[in-house]
Amino acid sequence: MTSIHNRIRELARRRNAIILAHNYQPPEIQDVADFRGDSLELSRKAAATNAEVIVFCGVYFMAETAAILSPSKQVLIPEPQAGCAMVTMAPIEAIREFKAKHPGAIVVTYVNSSAAVKAESDICCTSDNATKVVAELPADAKILFVPDRNLGHHVQQVTGREMILFPGCCPIHDQLTPGMIRAARKAHPGAPLMIHPESPPATTALADAVLSTSGMLRYVRDSAAQEFIVATEVGMLHRLGTENPGKTFHPVSGKLVCPDMKCITLEKVLHSLESMTHVVSVPEPMRLAALRAVERMVQTR
Ligand code: 13P
Ligand code: SF4
């Protein structure tokens, strides 16, 4: 291990800090973390930890969700500019306008959203439990799904529930095309293809399994196959590789790189712990309003 890795670990111990890393983080960040996971697992870990400080290596909405769930802990993000293009596509004004057009509807909000949007939602979900969250809503409910139209489309397909979809997306996954899927299958015949539900419907229709990042880990663990095609952000390859040493993983495309996920570095994590920055907090009235929807998300298994 590098000396900076060791300095981070030592300082985390002294500060009583837990380092959480999303599955898309660079390999060296995943390796220095106490815990890596998908959005749902990281939210649950943030809510349950006894640590006094949470260093969140991911994008801003993830750290903000930890701050909503854990007001007594100090939540730090090593790079406050690490945003999410999908969150930017759904400003609170646009969501209020969308709600106003459909009065009386239940608002289901993907965790990839701002705290302000969560505060105006009935229930949140992640890509891992979105179908469960929607399937459990009353049968006659009118449902608005925000902000990811691709995940919303997938949920409609699985649950058979009709929903009104806000037109946001993840520009990284939205680049995927059926041609890219077919080319990967031709290059690796017989390898099961796993895809993230933020991908366009024309591509998810060609996959063997549509899964959150933690769903992909479970799928690989339970499969007898030795090779897999992975259609999501490339950071996932490190987690899959380290946990499944005998198996081979092929990215569907090297182009699926989220620049926001990649702007956390070891130097920034060290600086974060040294200076106790950058603190992520949510104004109390907004936090309380968002908490209800986020707690329902964390509780849906
Ligand atoms: P997961 O919750 O599946 O890890 O996805 C988070 C995300 O931002 C996908 O782009
Ligand atoms: Fe947002 Fe897409 Fe990056 Fe995930 S991969 S953090 S949805 S921009």
Image (tube, helix red, strand yellow):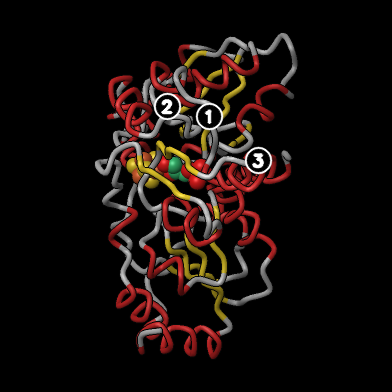
Q: CA distance from mark 1 to mark 3?
A: 20 Å
Left or right: 20, with 189 as reference point: right
Whether pointer 1 and pointer 3 mark residues with C-beta atoms closer than 8 Å, the reply is no
Left or right: 96, with 186 as reference point: right
Residue nearer the viewer, 90 or 177: 177
- Quarter the N terminus occupies: bottom left
The local secondary structure at tag 3 comes to helix
Mark 1 / mark 3, whichever is N-terminal: 1
Q: Is ligand 1 within 8 Å of the beta carbon of the residue shown at mark 3? A: no
Instruction: Please rate how many residues cluster around mark 3, counting C-alpha atoms within 10 Å: few if below 14, some from 14 to 19, many from 20.
Output: many
Q: Give the labeled residue for mark 3.
A: 297
Establish if 263 lies above or below 51: above
Q: Give the labeled residue for mark 2.
A: 95
Residue 251 x/y as whole percent: 36, 42
Which residue is painted at 73% across and 44% down in the image?
299
Residue nearer the viewer, 123 or 154: 154
Residue 71 x/y as whole percent: 60, 63
Which residue is painted at 60% across and 38% down in the image?
128
The local secondary structure at tag 1 comes to strand
Residue 68 x/y as whole percent: 57, 54
Left or right: 190, with 157 as reference point: left
Which residue is painted at 45% across and 66% down in the image?
30
**Disc 2 residue type (three-letter):** Ile
The local secondary structure at tag 2 comes to helix
Q: Quadrant of residue 289?
A: top right
Tag of residue 210: 1
Residue nearer the viewer, 21 or 55: 21
